[in-house]
Amino acid sequence: MGVTSYNQTPSFSSADAQDNDKLGFMLGYEYYFGPHHSVRIKADNSRVASEKNYKSYDSFKTSIDYAKQFSLANFSLSHSIADNGYDVADSFVHSTIVRKDTVNTTSVSFNGDLDKIIKIGAFKNTFYNINYSYIDTTSTLLNNEYKKEILNIGLTKRINF
């Protein structure tokens, strides 16, 4: 369950029109085979209610994730498919076509402790994360259809006091 509420300001006088409430449930199963492998399957059903009816929608998402722990890194591969069906047409975009999106997302990630790879004291308590995602969205409205690739690379240094 979630609530998104924007503060209305003179420079953003329509902020409250972006407010929405989300209610949903998720059901999943995780299976561990061997000490370092796991598979997770999830189904997620949710309802987003917005101030603007054309931004209200029902969503159903299924996903499957595989994870493996190596000595130098944790590996994860995931794929999800989300179907979002909107309540009414957005008259600013098209007066008769009601938006329906299908979002396919595939992600691969590696993360771990840099000290296990580079044995230098300066890298103690330094962690890395590399994540690549490919998103392919189809929609009944052409301006909501897209393909996107995202690459995130991160380093985190933990300092203990």
Image: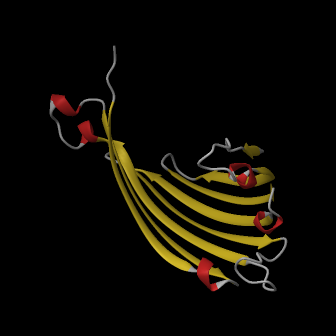
User: Colour scheme of this structure image?
Assistant: secondary structure
Work out whether 35 lies above or below 77.
Answer: above
Residue 116, picture quadrant: top left
Quadrant of the snapshot with the C terminus: top left
Work out whether 159 lies above or below 83.
Answer: above
Residue that appears at 64% across and 53% down: 31
- Image location (x, y in percent) of residue 27: 77, 54
- Image location (x, y in percent) of residue 33: 57, 53
Q: Residue furthest front?
A: 10
Work out whether 114 lies above or below 81.
Answer: above
- Image location (x, y in percent) of residue 125: 30, 30
Quadrant of the snapshot with the N terminus: top right
Residue that appears at 81% across and 86% down: 96
Is 96 positioned to the left or the right of 137 in the image? right
Residue that appears at 62% across and 63% down: 64
Q: Nearer the viewer, residue 138 or 63?
A: 138
Residue 78, picture quadrant: bottom right
Q: Residue furthest top?
A: 161
For the image, the number of numbered tags is 0
Is 41 positioned to the left or the right of 56 in the image? left
- Image location (x, y in percent) of residue 121: 17, 28
Asked if residue 154 can be seen in this view, the reply is yes
Q: Nearer the viewer, residue 65 or 82?
A: 82
Residue that appears at 62% across and 45% down: 10
Residue 130, picture quadrant: bottom left
Q: Residue furthest left?
A: 120
Asked if residue 70 can be seen in this view, the reply is no
Is 82 positioned to the left or the right of 98 in the image? left
